[in-house]
Amino acid sequence: MRIVCISDTHGKYKKIKHIPDADVLIHAGDSLGVGNTYDLGILNDWLGTLPHKHKILISGNHDWCFQNQPEKARATVTNAIYLEDSGISLGGYHFWGSPWTPRWHDMAFNLDRGEPLKKVWQRIPDNIDVLITHSPPAGVRDTVVTQFGEEQVGCVDLRSRLLELRNLKAHVFGHVHEGYGSEAWEDRGLRFVNASICNRRFQPSNPPIVFDL
């Protein structure tokens, strides 16, 4: 199965120069700019123009409409599978999507570090093959650059949970634009993909990332 990944398009998805064909397209959150249902409708129309057989969408901390108007937002998405602490099986592989990130400026789908986030990650089934979250796990492509230097902002409890998932083959995320790219834990056969399309200046300069299961 071939999977192509994007994330953090922030409403600039039409500026992606080329999205490779694949069996599954994953958008790992922050698809929108303002985060309202009007913009979501435009995104949905764009998703409908793409040739991928399966498309998976999760929310990010900018995607307010899924938190504030969940029924309307979900009804708007007709050209993708929307996952929010939920999963789906495609081609014999199990996918799970979750939008939560550690609290930062009280944005959408924020939770406090510690027990609140730990409870969310415990919902992830043991048998999943592909995990899709907006947040990176701690220590994996999660370094941001601030005026005070570099800081790792990924979720410790997310990392702890994924270490328990023995079937896990890939973890796709975004959120930290500076962390764009892919790497693997060869001893676990586990690939990590930070699919952020926008760079730290919110310019859509990064290409989609493709991998095979």
Image (tube, rainbow, N blue to C red):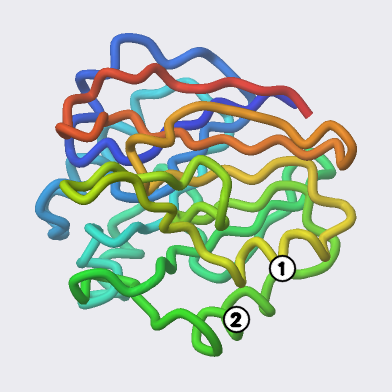
Q: Nearer the viewer, residue 161 or 96?
A: 161
**Callout 2: helix, strand or loop?**
helix
Q: Is residue 201 left or right of residue 175?
A: left
The three-letter amino acid code for the residue at tag 1 is: Arg
* Residue that badge 2 annotates: 118
Place residue 202 in its image quadrant.
Answer: top left
* Residue that badge 1 annotates: 161
Q: Which quarter of the figure is the C terminus placed in? A: top right
Q: Which quarter of the figure is the N terminus placed in? A: top right
C-alpha distance separating marks 2 and 1: 8 Å
Q: Is residue 180 left or right of residue 49?
A: right
Q: Nearer the viewer, residue 98 or 77?
A: 98
The three-letter amino acid code for the residue at tag 2 is: Lys
Sooner in the amino-acid sequence: mark 2 or mark 1:
2
Q: Are the residues at dot 2 and dot 1 in contact (C-beta closer than 8 Å)?
A: yes
Place residue 207 in its image quadrant.
Answer: top left
